[in-house]
Amino acid sequence: MGGEDERALRGSMTNAPRIGIRIYRAPASSARGAPLPLPLPMTGGASGSDLRADEVFTLAPLERRLVPTGICVAIPPGFEGQVRPRSGLASRHGVTVVNAPGTIDSDYRGEIAVALINLGQERFCAERGERIAQLVIAPVVQADWQEADRLDETARGSGGFGSTGR
């Protein structure tokens, strides 16, 4: 089934703004196999599109691994890609994204790889093509830092970790 047909079946967030993202799939090779399906939201209300592992891998408990996806993207300036864990992998197996959310900057053109960690108590084995993370495209604002001699007072002040209660 082609990408357009899959999108039509899954539906789309009808009120959500849309942005075109150019994507390049690594070509088929004896090491990689056929190109994997493009990232796709799995439901009409999904905010992220699933990323797939482009290799077979195993994670022992507490092991980290950078897993290639076989795709490169051209995210427009003013946006970023946020690589987030899949809730099912996290809740069932303890597998999550180490640096969640991982950031894909708009000027990065290399292959997307996902830094996974197994926080579970058993080995986790994944097949090539398995969905391992989600990619959310989000707008960004760049700060113009303005050095100050002091900051304005607030009720919270400098109270940090745990200062507002449990």
Image (cartoon, helix red, strand yellow):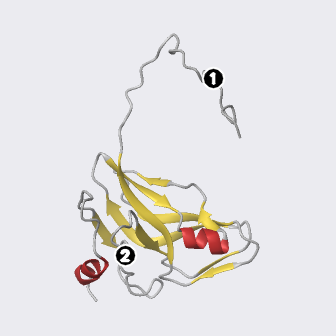
Mark 2–mark 1 distance (CA, rounded to whole Å): 49 Å
Q: In which quarter of the image is residue 70?
A: bottom left
Q: Residue at x 24, y 56 (%)?
A: 17
* Viewport quadrant of the C terminus: top right
From the viewer's perspective, is 141 left or right of 58? Answer: left
Query: Is residue 24 among what the camera can see?
Result: yes
Instruction: Name the spot of residue 47 as percent of width and height, x first.
Output: 38, 62
Q: Label for residue 158? A: 1
Instruction: Name the spot of residue 5 as percent of width and height, x first.
Output: 24, 83
Give the farthest residue toward the top.
Answer: 149
Instruction: Name the spot of residue 114 as percent of width and height, x first.
Output: 52, 65
Structural crowding at the residue carrying mark 1, measured as other residues with C-alpha within 10 Å and reported as few (<14), some (14–19) or many (≥20): few
Helix, strand or loop at label 1? It is loop
For disc 2, the marked residue is: 26
Q: What residue type is labelled 2?
A: Ala
Relative vertical location of residue 102 with respect to residue 1 in this rendering, above or below: above
Q: Which amino acid does label 1 sit on?
A: Ser
* Viewport quadrant of the N terminus: bottom left
Q: Residue at x 60, y 24 (%)?
A: 156
In front of the other: 109 or 59:
59
Structural crowding at the residue carrying mark 2, measured as other residues with C-alpha within 10 Å and reported as few (<14), some (14–19) or many (≥20): some
